[in-house]
Image: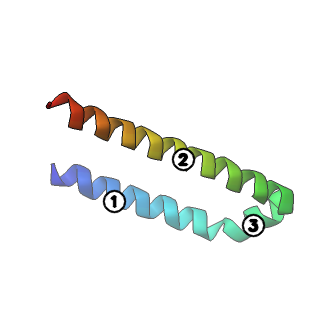
Amino acid sequence: EWRRWLLAIVLAWVASSVILYFASGMRRYLGERGLVAVTRLMGMVLTTIAVQMVLDGWRVAFARH
């Protein structure tokens, strides 16, 4: 079990490092409007994940009672 956690942490670290490494190049490539679009899209993705987590929590909490 701990190996899965370690792999997940390492993969997240590598992905973050790659994204940060190429961030300045992506900024030049996307431009201001592209960055705004990507920021909004990522905000929507994050909101979707948050709502799903809340719904999953409610489902677990109310399934016991």
Q: Nearer the viewer, residue 29 or 57?
A: 57
| Position in image of residue 40 (x %, y %) | 70, 52
Mark carried by residue 25: 3
Q: Is residue 19 left or right of residue 53?
A: right
Secondary structure of the residue carrying numbered label 2: helix
The structure residue drawn at horizontal position 28% and vertical position 32%, both measured from the top left corner, is: 59
Residue, disc 1: 9
The earlier-in-sequence mark between 1 and 3 is 1
Return the residue at label 2.
47
Q: Earlier in the sequence, mark 2 or mark 1?
A: 1
User: Which sits earlier in the primary sequence, circle 2 or circle 3?
Assistant: 3
Q: Which mark is residue 28?
A: none
Task: Look at label 3 and name its amino acid.
Answer: Gly
Q: Find out whether the residues at labels 2 and 3 contact each other: C-beta distance under 8 Å.
A: no
Q: Quadrant of residue 31?
A: bottom right
**Quarter containing the C terminus:** top left
Residue under the image location 30 percent in, 40 percent down: 57
